[in-house]
Image: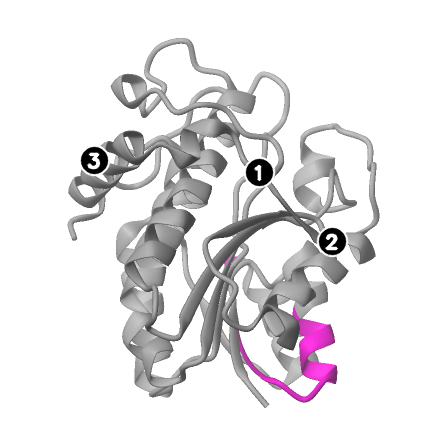
Amino acid sequence: MALIMITGASDGLGRALARTLAAQGHQLVVHGRDERRLAEIAAATGALAVRADLSSLAGVRQLAARVGAEHDRLDVLVNNAGVGFGPAGEPRRLSPDGHELRLAVNYLAPYLLSRLLLPLLRRATPARIVNVASIGQADVDLDNLMLEHDYDRFVAYRRAKLALIADTFDLAHDLAGSGVTVNALHPATLMPTTMVRDAGMERVESLEDGLRATLRLVVDPALAGVTGRYFDRDHESRAREQAYDPAFRARLRSVTERLVGT
């Protein structure tokens, strides 16, 4: 059975994914911010629980270091943790590093974590990185990356998810032939999660729908070797065109490397 790490595993989709994978016999590393809920899912799954604040780049590094101290390999990394739209009227918020919060958690954190854990993933090949993205995407303005002008919480979320998908394609290209695959997916629309409730939005699809689509990317043998793809639920789809633009991706990567210090 595989060793699988799930960020944002103390609630919603991540929690359901952890329970299902544990029931299948997989060994887990679960991450979360809420100590009580994280302890609950760890107790229910027998997982190694690591609490970390992924809005902080130092927190991302501490998380990777803890996992590396406990394990010398990793079969699957599921980058699931995220910040949603937030409540109506919520002002622009910054991470501890001074980055726009949704960009920091939904893009910079998985970008950095994936690269820090690559040595463990390479040792476990074939291995997988699964990025939980969204069908809600917006083109990224690299001249206003932190949304210092014309801030909108929906745009902030959608731009960060587009950046994550673009990096999925970039990292998959870099890792071609290595035995580590990288894919992104929109698991389901407005599942009944804390993020959706906090935004004051009504559920559209069930948590089970999102769980099924995500589980497929994590463990389905039919997807072994499939990389650099974007999935809408359980079928391959196409993201916004900007994510496929090599010039944009090169600029995004350059900016991102400066922001995360790689």
Could you give the CA–CA distance between mark 3 and mark 2, rounded to whole angstroms? 32 Å
Q: Amino acid under label 3?
A: Val
Q: Which segment is the magenta one?
A: 18-33
What amino acid is labelled 2 in the image? Gly
Q: Position of residue 172 (x, y in %)?
A: 38, 57
Q: Is residue 192 left or right of residue 33?
A: right
Toward the viewer: 179 or 207? 179
Indicate left or right for 16 with 29 as reference: right
Which residue lies under the disc numbered 3? Answer: 255
Residue bearing the label numbered 2: 210
Q: Which of pointers 3 and 1 indicates the residue nearer the eye?
A: 1
| Residue situated in front as seen by the camera: 138 or 55 | 138
Residue position marked by numbered label 1 in the rendering? 238
Mark 3, other Cα within 10 Å: few <14 / some 14–19 / many ≥20: some
Alpha carbon of mark 3 to alpha carbon of mark 1: how far?
24 Å
Task: Decide whether residue 25 is among the magenta residues.
Answer: yes
Q: Earlier in the sequence, mark 2 or mark 1?
A: 2
Q: Is disc 3 in contact with disc 1, using a CB cutoff of under 8 Å?
A: no
Residue 65: x percent and y percent?
A: 28, 73
- Tell me if I can see residue 44 in this picture: yes
